[in-house]
Image (cartoon, helix red, strand yellow):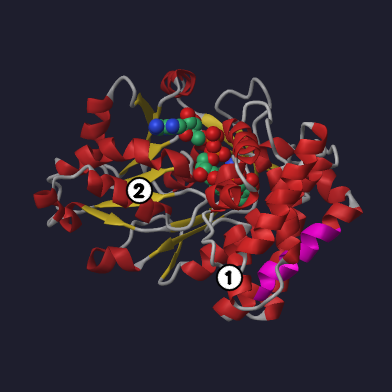
Amino acid sequence: MGKKAIHFGGGNIGRGFVAEFLHTAGYEVVFIDVMDNIINELQNTKSYQVTEVSEGGETTKTITNYRAINSKTHEQDVIQEISTADIVTCAVGPNILKFIAPVIAKGIDIRSTPKPLAVIACENAIGATDTLRGHIESHTDSERLKTMGERAQYANSAIDRIVPAQPPNSGLNVRIEKFYEWVVEKSPFGSVGHPDVPAIHWVDHLEPYIERKLFTVNTSHATAAYYGRYAGKKTIAEAMHDSYIRGVVRDVLKETSSLIIDKHEIEAQEQQDYVETIIARISNPYLEDSVERVGRAPLRKLGRKERFIGPAAQLAERGMKYDCLLGSVEMALRFQNVKDDEESAELAKILKENSPADATVQLTGLERTHPLFSSVVKVVDQVQSEAKETGQPRI
Ligand SMILES: NC(=O)C1=CN([C@@H]2O[C@H](COP(=O)(O)OP(=O)(O)OC[C@H]3O[C@@H](n4cnc5c(N)ncnc54)[C@H](O)[C@@H]3O)[C@@H](O)[C@H]2O)C=CC1
Ligand SMILES: O=P(O)(O)OC[C@H]1O[C@](O)(CO)[C@@H](O)[C@@H]1O
C-alpha cells in the first residue's frame, strides 16, 4: 500500500501548501473538512491546480491522488482512515484544534500498524501540535495514554506561505506566492525516523524558527493590515506602497529583530536579510490580499504568545524598546465590527463593557504585574476613549 496522509482543513493552506507538498512527496491525501461545498468539489474532481505567482511570472502544478471525507457526516470513515494512515496534518485555524481532536483520538486509539502515526499541526501558532496533542490526550482513556507513543508521535511546526483569499469562481484552484517555508521538529520521531517529505526542513529546536517567523512575517503583515485598514487601503500591497505605513512596518520590525537577535543569537545581517525578504513578500503586487483577511481574528492576534504581545512582553522583560509594537496593538484594537469577522465584533464588545485594565487582561492574557501591562492598558484606554467620544473607534 502507498503512503497515506490525512489532512484536516481543505482551505487555502490545506490545498495550496500542505497537500501540495504531501502530494509531491508521494502521499495519497485524504482531505477532511466540514464544509459541504469543499468536500463535494474535492469528491467530484480528480485534480486541481496550484499556481505560484511572482515577479518572474506564473508556474502551475497539478495536484491529483486525493479523496475527501466530511467529518460532520462520516466520522466513522475518518476514524478508519486515521487508523491506517502514515501522517495526520491540519490547517484549520488554532481555535479549531479542539474540535478535530476527538476524531483523531479515536483513530489513533484503534491503530494496530507497527509504525506510529506522525501528527503535525500546520497553524500559525506557537506549539500548535502540542495544543492538539493536549486535546487528543484529554479524549483518550488514561490507561491507553501509557502506550500512546507506540501509536502516535507529535511534532510542532512553523509554516510560511502567503495564500490570499481566492478570486471568485476559482473552484479548488489556488493562487499562491512562490516562497514557502515548512519547518518541523525532528526529535519527536526518535529512532522511528521522520516522515519523508522533501519540502520539510527538519530541525532539532523549533523555537528560533517559529519565533522568527511569527514575529517577523506575521507581525509585519498584521501591522500593515491594521494600519492599512485605518488609512482606508484595500490590499496589503497598497498599504505597503504608502511610505508612512512602510516606515511603521520597518520600525516595528526593528523592535522584533532586536529580540530575535538577542534571544536566538541570530546574526544581525542574517535577520536584516530575512526582514528584506519578508517586506518584499508582503509588498507583492501580484497577490490580491485584502487588509481584512490579513487582519482577521484580532482576538487571536492580540493573544499572550502572539505576534504583538508575545515579542513586546519579552522585550519589556529584557528592558528593551517596544513602543512601535504598541502602535500595532492600538491599530489592532481598532479592527472592530468588520464584516464576516466574529472576533472583531467580540473585540468591540469587550472594549465597550470593561475597564481598560480588565479589557487588557481579557484580550491579551497579560499578567497585571507584567512590565508591559500598564503600557497596554494606556493603549486600550485610548481606543476606548475614542469610542466614547464618537460612538466608534477612530477610522
Ligand atoms: N493563508 C495563509 O496565508 C496562511 C495560513 N496559515 C494558517 O493556516 C491555517 C488555515 O488557514 P487558511 O487555509 O488560510 O484558512 P481557510 O479558512 O482557507 O481554511 C480553513 C479550513 O478549515 C476548515 N475547517 C473548519 N473547521 C473544521 C473542522 N472542525 N474540521 C475540519 N475542517 C475544518 C474550513 O472549512 C476551511 O476549509 C490557519 O491556522 C492560518 O493561520 C499559515 C500560514 C499562511
Ligand atoms: O490566520 P493568520 O494567523 O493571519 O494566518 C495567515 C497569515 O500567515 C501568513 O501566511 C504568513 O505565513 C500570512 O500571509 C497570513 O496573513
Instruction: Please tell me whether mark 1 sits on a helix, a strand or a loop.
Output: helix
* Amino acid type at image mark 1: Gln
* Amino acid type at image mark 2: Leu
Q: Which residues are magenta?
A: 247-258
Where is residue 320 drawn, in percent x and y? 68, 76
Where is residue 222 drawn, in percent x and y? 69, 49
Residue annotated with mark 1: 314
Where is residue 24 drawn, in percent x and y? 46, 46
In the depicted view, which residue is nearer to us: 313 or 240? 313
| Dominant secondary structure, magenta | helix
In the depicted view, which residue is nearer to us: 326 or 66? 326
The crowding category of the residue bearing disc 1, from other C-alpha atoms within 10 Å (few below 14, some 14 to 19, many at least 20), is: some
Q: Is residue 299 above or below residue 103?
A: below
* Residue farthest toward the right in the current orientation of the protein: 243
At 44% from the left and 35% from the top, the residue drawn is: 9
Task: Place residue 165 in its image quadrant.
Answer: top right
Residue annotated with mark 2: 132
